[in-house]
Image (cartoon, rainbow, N blue to C red):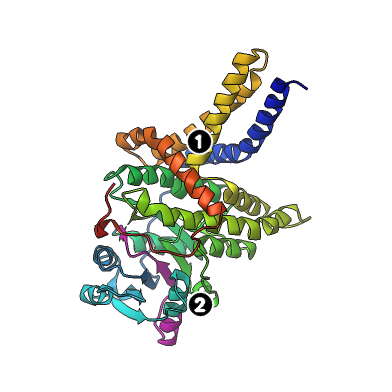
Amino acid sequence: MSGGVVAQRVLAAAQVALAVPVVYLGGLTAVAVAKSRRPPSPATPPEPATRFVVLVPAHDEATTIATMLASATSQDYPAHLFTVHVVADNCTDDTAAVVTASGATVHERHDTDNRGKGPALNWLVDRLVQADVPFDVAVFIDADTTVATDFLRVLDRRFQRGSVAVQGFYGVREAFESTPATLRYCALAARHHCRPLARTTIGGSCGLFGNGMAFSRHLVVSREWSAHLVEDLEFQLELLLEGVHVDYEPDARLEAEMPHTFAASVTQHQRWEVGRFDLIRRFVPSLLTRVLRPGGTGRVAALDAAADLCVPPLSLLGAATAASAGAGAVLAVVSPQRSRPLLVGLALLTTVCLHVLASLHLVGAPTRAYRSLLHAPRLAVWKVSILVRSMLGKNSDWIRTTRNAEGNTE
C-alpha cells in the first residue's frame, strides 16, 4: 500500500470523526436561524406573581459584588415579591460588609473542609428553608454579574407558563475591553445563545451555565448541588435523565465579567475541561442507553445532550477543520485525482465558520467582534495547552478566577 493511500485513509478517518460535531453544530445553526426569524406571538404579560429568592455565592468578592447587587436589588419587579441573599463563603475580605451596605441579606459561612460553590449554595438553601423564607423560584447569580432590570419580570412570565427550570442569556460584561474578553463574547454567542435556542426548539434541554439559572422551589429543595468542577452541567444532566428539561429564555439577560488576560483564565478553562471529561465518562453511556432503549421517551433530548457533551471547544474544532482542509490541499497537490479530502475539509471548515458568524449575527454583535476572530489561531494554540494539561489531570481542584479589578494586565 502506497504512502499516499495510507495518508488519504488516515485523513478520511479524521474527517469522519470531525464530521460528527461539525454536522451537529451545523444542524443547530440552521434551526436557530430559522427560529429567530419567527415573529414572537403577541400576548399580554401577566401580572407578576412569582416569589423569587436571588441567591449569590461569593468568595472574596468585595471588589465586584457591589455592582451586581445594585442591579439585582433595583429590579423592575414588585419589591415584596423578591429578596436577595448572599452567602459569603469562607471570605477573608470585606464581602459581608459590602453586602450589608447594599441592603441585601448576607449569610456568612465558615467551613474550610467543605469548600466550593455547590456546598455553599446547599448551605444557603437549607438556611432559607429552615427560616421559612417564602419563595416559589430560586435564581442563582454570580457575584461578578450585572443583571438586566427586567430579568425577574421575564422569568416570572416563563414560570407562569409552566417552566420548572430556566436558563437565561449569559453574556460578557465589558466584552470589548480586551482581546480575551472579546473572543469569549464570540464563543458565548454560540455556546450561550445559538445552541440553546436550537436545542430547546428541537425538544432538548438547553443546558445550564452556572449563572442566570432559575428553578422551582421543589427542584431546589429536593436536590443538592455537588462539589463537582462543573456542578451546573452535572445538575442539568441529572435532571434530564429524570425527565426534567431546562428551558432557554433569551430575554432574561445578564452579563458577567470575563478575565482580560489569557493567563487569568487558565484555571477557569482547565476546570471546565477536566469537569467535562469526567461528565462524558459518567453520563454519555446512560444517555446513549436512553436513545437505544426500545419504546423509550426523551430520545432526542438524550442524543442532543450526549452530542453537546462531546463537542470540543470551538477554537479547537476550527483549528482541527482548518488542518483537515490544509492536509486535503497538500494531498490534492501531490495526487490531483484525490481531491475529495480537500472538498470535505473545506466543507467542515466552512460549517464551523458559519456557526460562529451566524451566532454573532443572532446576538447583534458589532463589527469589532467579527474583527476579533483574527486572533482565533492564538486562542486555539492556547486552548490546546489547556486541553493537554486537563488530559494529564493537572490542577483539577477548584481555584477562584482572579478578577480584573485585582490587577490583571494583558
Q: Is residue 75 left or right of residue 281?
A: left
Left or right side of 222 for 62:
left
The answer to which quarter of the image holds residue 284 is: bottom right
Residue at 58% x, 55% y: name it. Answer: 277
Q: Is residue 129 magenta?
A: yes
Asked if one can make out residue 206 in the rendered structure from this viewpoint, the answer is no
Asked whether disc 2 touches disc 1, contact meaning CB atoms under 8 Å apart, the reply is: no
- Which percent across, then down, holds residue 92? 30, 75
Q: Name the residue under label 2.
A: 221
Query: Is residue 79 shown left or right of residue 223?
Result: left
Q: Which residue is situated farthest in the top direction here?
A: 336
Foreground mark, 2 or 1, reads 1
- The mark nearer the N terminus, 2 or 1, is 2
Please state the horizontal and vertical placement of residue 114, each as a whole percent of the image.
Answer: 47, 77
Q: Give the number of the disc on residue 56.
A: none
The quadrant of the picture occupied by the N terminus is: top right
x and y percent of residue 344 in the render?
61, 26
Magenta stretch containing residue 130, yes or no? yes
Characterize the local packing of mark 1: few (<14), some (14-19) or many (20 or more) Cα atoms within 10 angstroms.
many
Mark 2 and mark 1: Cα distance apart in space: 41 Å
Residues shaded magenta:
126-148
Q: How many labels does the image show?
A: 2
Disc number placed over residue 318 in the picture, else none? 1
Residue displayed at 52% across by 48% down? 387
Residues 16 and 396: in front is: 396
19, 180: nearer the viewer: 180
Identified by mark 2, the residue type is Val
Q: In the rendered view, would you say 323 is above or below 145?
A: above
Residue 333 visible within the image: yes
Residue shown at 65% from the left, 14% from the top: 335
Q: Where 368 sits versus 143, above or below?
A: above
Q: How crowded is mark 2: few (under 14 residues within 10 Å), some or many (20 or more)?
A: some
